[in-house]
Image: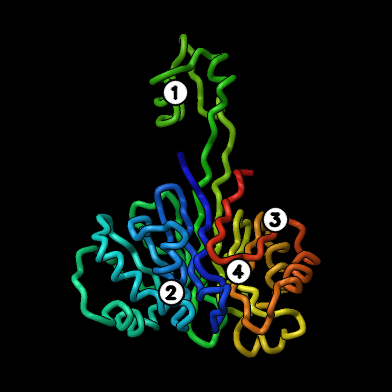
Amino acid sequence: MSQRELVVLGTASQVPTRHRNHNGYLLRWDGEGLLFDPGEGTQRQMLHAGVSATQITRIGVTHFHGDHCLGLAGVIQRINLDKVPHPVDAYYPAGGEVYFERLRYSTAYHETAELRPRPISAPGVLQAPGAPFTLEARRLSHPVESYGYRLVEPDGSRMLPERLAALGLRGPAVGRLQREGRVEVDGRTVTLDEVSEPRPGQRFAFVMDTRLCDGVYELAEGADLLVIEATFLEGDTRLASEHGHLTAVQAAQVAAASGVRTLVLTHFSQRYPDLDGHLAEARAHFDGELVLAEDLARVPVPPRR
């Protein structure tokens, strides 16, 4: 049975707190596990969340500030320690190649797993071998080179049992119809359109440290689940812009304008002892499903439209 959910491993911004670990987010998408921005302590958070290294099939780093990547060294070594049997693709900004290599080989260990570096040199569709989805990257606006990620499932169709039954279609004939688009039944040609309806593919977007820019909207467009930073409150908008971040209001406005279904706010500054302000400010601009991320929480991808 397929399972699609976000496992939150950490939600702090630059400085972790007693209740918030540095960043870390695992998207479970059927048989894939996409680990985004593994900050310091991610390996231990995985243990608390019941996530194993063998569940990771891809790693996506938005940029090379420490709170988004210092856990990469431990995660890579754990992948090798556990002898993960499948290749793991690692996506990251090409301009940070030196940091990726330093983290990958920060200490001595035995390489037993296949890690495939996939540096991103330009926005667009990324190479994602064997994936049942398209993985895309868009450039963000931050003091260092940064990319956000977008997962897009192709549109498909859903078979309608009542129409299949009415036409006497069952067993191997249904499979042939799905493969070939048409099948002969009692001397008549039945097409796939007659016994199915469109099934829109689902979309996930991951937006970390950035000012408002075109890339933010391109990533968020039509997302069923959007994970986006909301480091500051509206009163600190100028500070947010200076440091290349978003406010809760800006994140909510992006979600509303982009038709997002479930909005997950995260990457909170330590300056806010509670998140009541984030909730109030975001709710004033977004009326869909709204989640303030908490460490070790699980957020399901909403059911298909």
**Disc 3 to disc 2, how far (Cα)?**
29 Å
Q: What is the x, y in percent for residue 159? A: 53, 29
Q: Residues within 10 Å of mark 4 (few under 14, many from 20)?
A: many
Which element type, helix, strand or loop, lies under badge 2? Answer: loop
Labels 2, 4: front one? 2
Q: Earlier in the sequence, mark 3 or mark 4?
A: 4
Q: Are marks 1 and 2 in contact (CB under 8 Å)?
A: no
Distance between the Cα atoms at labels 3 and 4?
14 Å
Q: Are marks 3 and 4 in contact (CB under 8 Å)?
A: no
Residue underneath mark 1: 174
> What residue does disc 3 label?
289
Horizontal side, residue 2 vs residue 300: left or right: left
Residue type marked 2: Gly
Q: Can you give x and y, in whole percent of width and height, for residue 183 in the image?
A: 44, 21
Q: Label 1, label 2: how many angstroms apart (C-alpha)?
A: 49 Å
In this rendering, position of residue 284 left or right of residue 194: right
In percent of width and height, residue 271 lies at 66, 84
Circle 4 is placed at which residue position?
228
Query: Which is nearer the N-term, disc 4 or disc 1?
Result: 1
Nearer to me, 102 or 211: 102
Along the polypeptide, which appears first: circle 1 or circle 3?
1
Residue named by callout 2: 41
**Camera-side residue of 55 and 217:** 55
Q: Which tag, 2 or 4, sits closer to the chain's start?
A: 2
Q: Residues within 10 Å of mark 1 (few under 14, many from 20)?
A: some
